[in-house]
Image (spheres, rainbow, N blue to C red):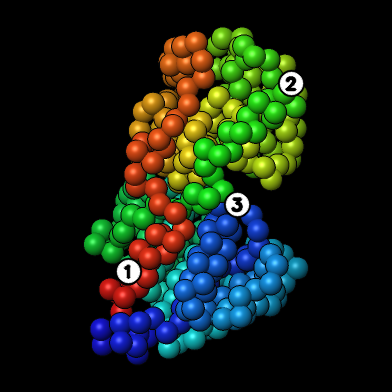
């Protein structure tokens, strides 16, 4: 391989840079998954972060390096972290960047782009932090040896908006825990529906959301008001919504059971680079109704996924189509792996990342 970062084709250690190490969703969960899996392979890790709250006892071969904050302002500190984090790496090891790192990385993992987000929400007037973010992002992609995008949608944004050579780009979809999300969750279906007060003839749509505006709640409610009265929307979120067709679940940790209790999960996101809700629900046997802006639509085939455009008319049609698929009983996806073969578990995903690291070095 011709690099001191590898020893006899074996990676001797890895730097991982991400600003927040704690239990959470999206990239936070992805970071924990990478650290847990790679450390379990006896690969020493140096994890560089601003905030560190490891759940439980940290693996002995993981060194956490906490970069101090320099101001009282979180957005400023996040910017400064991205600019300075590479100074803390072990230079003998390759580096995986999960945030917009200044300096060179071996793999830049991209879960979404800022320009893609701004375009999706139609924000025409950019503020100082938008400009700073785009500047860091451009440098991050340019200086990386290779880029891993979490969907073709994101990969296209990197090429179109940042003029990056497509040969640097690799599409590797984010992993899902096959042990946490499985058909076994369906054993709690009837109990959960009873607890929620769902009637036998009602069709329960699950809407997990940490941002109702971005996830498209208004569009969903508009379409529901035009659709069959049997549809009800269960919202898993800290933010409650007052509407006659809504069941507020609050924040929940039992997502597999909720997916299994629902007749479908739904997202109408303005910007959703991937959307783990999709494959997680399908692994629990529950189909999904997703806007074509959701990256996961690339990998979930019908009848597990019903797609629609971001208009009330298109979503209303999709709900009607879904209703017809229900027939006399709920549609259950009994062989989810056949309908989304590109989705892998964490172990397979990390194996692909390691192979990529070896090729780049």
Give the secondary structure at mark 3. Answer: loop
**Residue occupied by mark 3:** 25
The numbered mark at residue 356 is 1
The vertical placement of 60 against 214, above or below, is: below
Q: Quadrant of the N terminus?
A: bottom left
Q: Quadrant of residue 301?
A: top left
- Report crowding for label 1: few under 14, some 14 to 19, many 20 or more residues within 10 A (C-alpha): some
The vertical placement of 182 against 306, above or below, is: below
Could you give the CA–CA distance between mark 1 and mark 3, rounded to whole angstroms? 25 Å
Residue at left 24%, top 62%?
Answer: 167
Q: Are the residues at dot 2 and dot 3 in contact (C-beta closer than 8 Å)?
A: no
Q: Earlier in the sequence, mark 2 or mark 1?
A: 2
Give the secondary structure at mark 1. Answer: helix
Q: Quadrant of residue 59?
A: bottom right
Residue 281 x %, y %? 52, 37
Residue at left 37%, top 70%?
Answer: 354
Depth order, front residue of 326/71: 326
């Amino acid at each position: 391989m011709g690099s001191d970062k590898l020893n006899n084709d074996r990676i001797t250690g890895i730097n991982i840079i991400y600003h927040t190490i704690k239990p959470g969703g999206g990239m936070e969960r992805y970071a924990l998954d990478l650290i847990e899996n790679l450390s379990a392979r006896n690969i020493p890790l140096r994890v560089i972060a601003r905030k560190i709250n490891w759940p439980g006892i940290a693996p002995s071969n993981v060194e956490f390096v906490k970069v101090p904050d320099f101001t009282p302002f979180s957005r400023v500190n996040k910017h400064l972290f991205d600019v300075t984090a590479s100074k803390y790496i072990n230079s003998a090891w390759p580096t995986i960047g999960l945030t917009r790192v200044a300096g060179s990385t071996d793999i830049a993992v991209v879960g979404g782009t800022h320009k893609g987000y701004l375009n999706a929400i139609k924000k025409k007037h950019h503020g100082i932090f938008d400009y700073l973010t785009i500047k860091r992002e451009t440098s991050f992609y340019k200086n990386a040896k290779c880029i891993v995008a979490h969907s073709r949608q994101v990969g296209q944004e990197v090429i179109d908006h940042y003029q990056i050579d497509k040969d640097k780009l690799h599409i590797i979809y984010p992993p899902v825990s096959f042990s946490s999300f499985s058909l076994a969750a369906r054993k709690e279906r009837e109990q959960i529906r009873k607890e929620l007060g769902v009637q036998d003839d009602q069709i329960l749509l699950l809407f997990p959301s940490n941002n109702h505006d971005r996830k498209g709640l208004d569009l969903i409610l508009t379409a529901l008001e035009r659709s069959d009265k049997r549809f009800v929307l269960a919202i898993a979120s800290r933010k409650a919504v007052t509407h006659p067709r809504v069941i507020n679940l609050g924040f929940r940790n039992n997502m597999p059971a909720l997916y299994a209790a629902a007749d479908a999960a739904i997202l109408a996101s303005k910007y959703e680079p991937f959307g783990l809700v999709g494959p997680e629900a399908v692994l629990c046997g529950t189909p999904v109704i997703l806007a074509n802006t959701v990256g996961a639509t690339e990998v979930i085939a019908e009848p597990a996924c019903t797609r629609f455009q971001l208009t009330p008319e298109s979503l209303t049609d999709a709900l009607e189509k879904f209703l017809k698929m229900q027939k006399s009983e709920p549609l259950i996806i009994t062989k989810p792996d056949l309908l989304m073969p590109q989705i892998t578990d964490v172990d397979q995903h990390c194996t692909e990342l390691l192979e990529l690291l070896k090729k780049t070095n």
